[in-house]
Image (cartoon, rainbow, N blue to C red):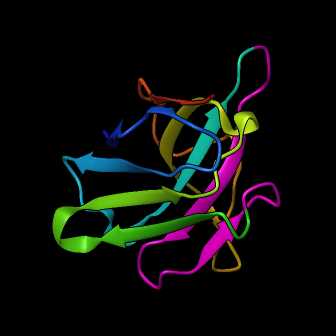
Amino acid sequence: QLQLVESGGGLVQPGGSLRLSCAASGFTLDYYAIGWFRQAPGKEREGVSCIVISDGSRNYADSVKGRFTMSRDNAKNTVYLQMNSLKPEDTGVYYCAAVTRRLGLCVLSLQTLSPWGQGTQVTVSS
């Protein structure tokens, strides 16, 4: 079973940065696309960004374009989400999951290919 574990969350002031990690166990990420999702208190879970591991192509939600960057380290079997210029509205629990592809691009659909993990809490507050 595909299993991914998130880490790296924390409390940061507005304008600050955090880097989240998503580590795979029991399988190699090489043949998958991985997405980051978040869920703010009282709101539905939403897609943030995704990456196709094999070619590095990325897809970002409009709300994070220019501020968030996904990357991967194939040797560590890990995907990262670098979050800069953080805003209070970025607060939430962040999850990673394997996602589907359509026409070669990753899709930020909640119908993921791997189960949801525990997530990692990101709080942006002064």
Quick check: is 53 in the magenta stretch? yes
Image quadrant where one finds the N terminus: top left
Q: Residue furthest front?
A: 126
Of residue 54 and residue 50, the one placed in the foreground of this image is: 50
Answer whether residue 74 is magenta in the image. Answer: no
Position of residue 29 relative to residue 121, above or below, is below
84 or 80, nearer to the observer:
84
In the rendered image, residue 16, in percent from the top left (x then y), is placed at 55, 49
| Residue 117, position as x, y percentages in the image | 42, 28
Q: Which stretch appears magenta?
A: 42-64
Q: Is residue 53 left or right of residue 61?
A: left
Quadrant position of residue 10: top left
Q: Residue at x 69, y 54 (%)?
A: 108
Q: Decide: is 83 above or below 46.
A: below
Q: How many numbered circles does the render carry?
A: 0
Q: Residue at x 43, y 65 (%)?
A: 32
Given residues 11 and 90, the one toward you in this image is: 11
- Residue 55 higher or lower than 5, as above or below: below
Task: Tell me if 53 is positioned left or right of 95 in this view.
Answer: left
Residue 115 pos. (x, y %)? 46, 32
Decide: is 66 above or below 108.
Answer: below
Q: The C terminus is located in which quarter?
A: top right
Across and down, in percent, residue 121 comes to: 49, 27
